[in-house]
Each structure stands twice: as structure tokens, then as C-alpha cells.
Image (spheres, rainbow, N blue to C red):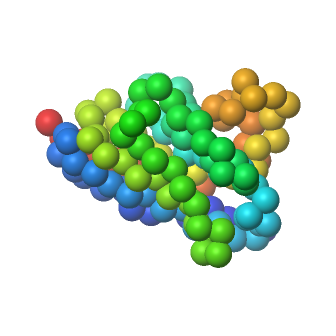
Amino acid sequence: QVQLVESGGGSVQAGGSLRLSCLASGITFKTSSVAWFRQAPGKEREGVARLSSGGMTQYADSVKGRFTISRDNAKYTVYLEMNNLKQEDAAMYYCAVRFVGSSTAEYFSSRAYEHWGQGTQVTVSP
């Protein structure tokens, strides 16, 4: 049984930083691609960052230069370092593991990942 548990969310002022973590279990983690998505109230879930098993990264344009995705395969953990946070970054953040899409165009499609965590809330105040 695959489990993903996110942590590290919280409240921060604009310009601040947070580091999210996602601990995976029940999966061959080192061969799985991992991703972070977010969903704000009233909005669709959107992809934020993706990291392949081989180390390739993709980022949404809105977070490039501010967010960094990384992984520690020995710890079965994926991280999202978020710097210079903006109010528009406020959302529930979810990690996703194992890309099952059919093309690179689906890298940030929520339908293209097999396993999901329950999310961790990020709040950004002015």
C-alpha cells in the first residue's frame, strides 16, 4: 500500500521561505518520478514542479527561480524548497508519485500521477 505524507506547510509572510517534505512508503521510490501540485480555493489543481527518477526537473513558469524540487532516495523523501513566497502561492500543496501519463505534455496533469498525498497547507500573508 502506497502512502505519501506531506509536511512542512504553514503560515509565512510574503518574501519568506518554506520547505515542504513528502515521505513515501510502499513504493519503489528511486525509480519513480515525483511532482508537487497545488490547489487554491476555487481553482484547479496545478502542477508546480516535477523531478524524474533520472534527475530531470520541470517547473511551472510561475515558480521558476523561486522553487526547487529535490529528492533523497535513501530517505524516500521528496522536497520542495520555496523561496520569495508570494500571496498567490498560497494553496494546499500535494505531492504525487509515479507518472503514468503517455507524453511529456502531461507532466503537470493531475490525471497523470498514480499516487497522491493528503496535502499540506501553505498560507502567505502580506
| Residue placed most toward the observer, 40 or 109 | 109
Query: Left of 118 or right of it: where is 107?
Result: right
| Residue placed most toward the observer, 41 or 77 | 77
Say above or below: 74 vs 101: below
Q: Position of residue 26 (x, y in %)?
A: 76, 70
Q: Quadrant of the C terminus?
A: top left
Residue at 48 percent of width and 35 percent of height: 39
Query: Left of 9 or right of it: where is 86?
Result: left
Q: Quadrant of the N terminus?
A: bottom right
| Residue placed most toward the observer, 40 or 37 | 37
Q: Position of residue 59 (x, y in %)?
A: 53, 35
| Residue placed most toward the observer, 50 or 39 | 50
Say above or below: 77 vs 69: below
Residue that extends furthest to the right in the rendered view of this protein: 102
Query: Left of 42 or right of it: where is 102?
Result: right
Say if residue 28 shows up in the picture. yes
Q: Looking at the image, how many numbered discs can be counted on the residues?
A: 0
Residue at 51 percent of width and 30 percent of height: 60
Residue that extends furthest to the left in the rendered view of this protein: 126
Q: Position of residue 22 (x, y in %)?
A: 54, 61
Q: Position of residue 25 (x, y in %)?
A: 69, 70
Say above or below: 28 vs 54: below
Say if residue 119 shows up in the picture. no
Say above or below: 81 vs 111: below
Residue at 64 percent of width and 75 percent of height: 74
Residue at 65 percent of width and 68 percent of height: 73
Residue that extends furthest to the bottom in the rendered view of this protein: 74
What is the quadrant of residue 100 in the picture?
top right
